[in-house]
Amino acid sequence: MQLDIFSPKAPPLFGLDISSSSVKMLEIVEAGKGAYRVERYVIEPLPRDATVDGNISNLEMVVESVKRGYKRLGTRSKHVAMAVPTGAVITKKIIVPASLRETELEVQVESEANQYIPFALEEVNLDFQVVGPSPTSPDEQEVMIAATRKEKVEDRVAVAESAGLKAMVMDIESFAQQAALGLVVSQLPGAGKDLNVAIVDIGANVMNVSVMRNEQSVYTREQAFGGNQLTQDIVARYGMSVEEAESAKRSGGLPDDFETEVLRPFMENLSMEVQRALQFFFTSTQYHSVDQILLAGGSAVIPGMDEVVQTRTQVPAMVANPFAAMQASPRIQMKKLMVDAPSLIVACGLAMRRFDP
């Protein structure tokens, strides 16, 4: 299985996103010209330590979760689009002569990749796509190279196969996320043209911050802060086990002072982390402003999180919902989908691969 980030149309498939805390599966279908419908989705929890830093550390545990999730999903399709973690992929834009034929381009890409990739090419899955003409020279073109170690791809393919599924597309999490968030950005004023849009994805352990401008990523940064911090705070204050704290966090069975003593300080800390990330963006690029913040990931749906981030950063903030302009099948509870939406961003980008031209 090659990295298949830029490949053309896949057969009917659904998105399968393996994150640090759960497996997400999502199927989107066409509902008329240019319209989409969320057909079905599931979020199946993963046992602790089944994945570590996005890497699959216990294959059997992950396979069992995928099997359970697939059974609940209730689709006929066995074809999936998956993604490797962003941190496991090296991406690089290179400039090549515009006159190169496909075979010559492949040779050029391999020789360039050799310079940037710190492992032997036979250990690597390599993919590339012509981005377009070079902005500085009409005789040259930009090409995006993406490379990851073969085992990163093979681990995910093995999960799919062991669960009776077939991985048709292997994307990169950040690319899938950008594809889904393109649906959100298109709903901003002027369809987001010339706006700097900061995407803050709050995972369990890390917060990924990327800034998009005109569908291009102009900045990315990872910070060690995530939703697990809130779990640890609950454990420390109320003497619960991690499992009890996770369960109480979801169902709301926490003491009266939880909001003032634990939740509010967590939200303030998170907003400070976002502010720090934006400061890094301003000091390391030519940009001095951000026009919109989109919040994604499990912690994005804490009521009032967008307001706290907006107050701290003085930038309009909203919870990212790529499904806002989509229809939903009768089996889906809209209220629940709205709550789950920020956790389904990568799965949405993967599910949309079924409509590749």
Image (cartoon, rainbow, N blue to C red):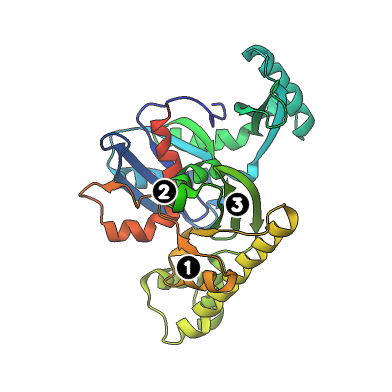
Residue located at (46% from left, 68% from top): 246
Sequence-wise, which precedes: disc 3 or disc 2? 2
**Circle 2 Cα neighbour tier, 10 Å, few/some/many (<14 / 14–19 / ≥20):** many
Residue furthest bottom as drawn = 257
Q: Which mark is residue 131?
A: none
- Does 352 appear above or below 252? above
- Does 353 appear above or below 200? above
Q: Is any atom of residue 239 visible in this view?
A: no
- Does 306 appear above or below 37? below
Residue bearing the label numbered 1: 306
* Quadrant that contains the C terminus: top left
Q: Nearer the viewer, mark 3 or mark 2?
A: 3
Residue furthest right as drawn = 115
C-alpha distance separating marks 1 and 3: 17 Å
C-alpha distance separating marks 2 and 1: 24 Å
* Percent of width and height locating residue 114: 76, 27
Image mark count: 3
Residue located at (72% from left, 23% from top): 96
**Circle 3 Cα neighbour tier, 10 Å, few/some/many (<14 / 14–19 / ≥20):** many
| Secondary element at tag 2 | strand
Asked whether disc 3 touches disc 2, contact meaning CB atoms under 8 Å apart, the reply is no
* Percent of width and height locating residue 12: 35, 30
Q: Which amino acid does label 3 sit on?
A: Val
- Front one among 279 and 81: 279
| Secondary element at tag 3 | strand
* Percent of width and height locating residue 110: 71, 22
Q: Which mark is residue 24?
A: 2
Residue bearing the label numbered 3: 211
Q: Is residue 7 found left or right of 248 in the rendered image?
A: right
Asked whether disc 2 touches disc 1, contact meaning CB atoms under 8 Å apart, the reply is no
